[in-house]
Image (cartoon, rainbow, N blue to C red):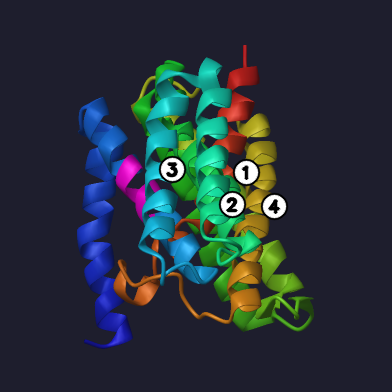
């Protein structure tokens, strides 16, 4: 199967599934899907930093990320409990192995997995806050739109490198195009909510600012996970999405954008 065919297959299957889970599925289905994504992401990060040879590290990364999704959603006031449990288990394992476990692997299994779980839990916290479930699409829209517009702007207009030591193909012109595309898609989202769903929870002006902020967060997220891949010499985190790579390849920007949207919506009157 060619790269183009695999991308089309992922889109044909993935987009309807995403729309169903976000817009129509019971909350427990969305919780389960987020736990699975977080768990796979935790394993991918551990594999990236060299923990694949140790089954306990892979399991710890997956379990910590998946459990964090449900724990932070349902028991966010007890966040310190899950943090301490994960940290204690990770360092206990490292001590028991007598230095064979690297610090980068400990951090991937603790900080990395906890961050992945906490970010994916943003969707559940947004829903619990009472917003229309259509707004749960915003982290995807304001991540994928930025990436798509940046790609085409970079191809047609790109001349000045944005971060050549991290991602040589990204350009300043592409970055600006991504931000502009994000604003356009954000405004279109407000229009759709006003036109077909009885009004938007956020106006055009605030949405333009939110889209810009999310565009910056999306690009930082993309470059951050690219930085990790470059440091450890891998091309993709995984292949669960075929040519799109793994969870952390596909949702790197979403992991940064979703908490930003959650925080901004929590501040709205």
Q: Quadrant of residue 152?
A: bottom right
Q: Is residue 30 left or right of residue 228?
A: left
Residue at 42% across / 50% down in the picture?
60
Specify which label sits upstream in the sequence, 4 or 3.
Answer: 3
Q: Which residues are magenta?
A: 35-40
- Name the main secondary structure of what is drawn in magenta: helix
What residue does disc 1 label? 211
Q: Secondary structure at mark 4?
A: helix
Disc number placed over residue 131 in the picture, else none: none
The residue mark sitting in front, 3 or 2, is 3
Disc number placed over residue 64 in the picture, else none: 3
User: Picture coordinates of residue 24 (x, y %)?
Assistant: 22, 32
The residue mark sitting in front, 1 or 4, is 4
User: Picture coordinates of residue 57 (x, y %)?
Assistant: 44, 58
Residue 188 shows in this picture: no
Residue at 24% across / 81% down in the picture?
5
User: What is the CA distance from the residue labelled 3 to the residue labelled 2?
Assistant: 32 Å
Quarter of the image with the C terminus in it: top right
Q: Is residue 250 left or right of residue 112?
A: left
Task: Mark 3 and mark 2 in contact? Answer it, CB < 8 Å.
Answer: no
Q: Quadrant of residue 194?
A: top left
What residue does disc 2 label? 182
User: What is the CA distance from the residue labelled 2 to the residue labelled 4?
Assistant: 10 Å
User: What is the CA distance from the residue labelled 1 to the residue labelled 2?
Assistant: 5 Å
Specify which label sits upstream in the sequence, 3 or 2.
Answer: 3
Q: Classify 10 Å Cα crowding around label 3: few (below 14), some (14-19), many (20 and above).
A: many
What residue does disc 4 label? 216
Residue 121 shows in this picture: yes
């Amino acid at each position: 199967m060619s790269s183009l065919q695999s991308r089309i297959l992922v889109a044909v299957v993935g987009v309807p599934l995403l729309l169903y889970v976000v817009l129509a599925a019971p909350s427990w289905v969305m919780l389960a899907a987020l736990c699975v994504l977080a768990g796979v992401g935790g394993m991918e990060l551990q594999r990236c930093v060299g923990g694949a040879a140790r089954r306990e590290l892979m399991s710890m990364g997956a379990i910590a990320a998946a459990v964090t999704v449900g724990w932070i959603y349902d028991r966010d006031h007890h966040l310190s409990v899950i943090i301490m449990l994960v940290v204690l288990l990770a360092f206990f394992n490292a001590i028991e192995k007598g230095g064979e476990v690297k610090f980068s692997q400990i951090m991937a299994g603790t900080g990395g997995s906890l961050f992945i779980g906490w970010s994916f839990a943003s969707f559940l916290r947004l829903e619990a806050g009472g917003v229309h479930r259509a707004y749960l699409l915003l982290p995807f829209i304001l991540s994928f739109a930025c990436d798509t517009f940046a790609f085409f702007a970079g191809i047609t207009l790109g001349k000045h490198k944005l971060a050549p030591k991290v991602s040589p193909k990204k350009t300043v012109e592409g970055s600006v195009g991504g931000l502009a595309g994000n604003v356009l898609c954000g405004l279109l989202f407000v229009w759709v909510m006003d036109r077909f769903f009885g009004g938007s929870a956020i106006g055009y002006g605030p949405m333009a600012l939110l889209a810009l902020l999310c565009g910056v967060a999306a690009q930082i997220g993309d470059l951050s996970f690219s930085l990790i891949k470059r440091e450890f010499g891998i091309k993709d985190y995984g292949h669960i999405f075929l040519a799109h790579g793994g969870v952390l390849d596909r949702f790197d920007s979403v992991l940064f954008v979703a908490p930003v949207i959650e925080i901004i919506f929590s501040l709205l009157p």
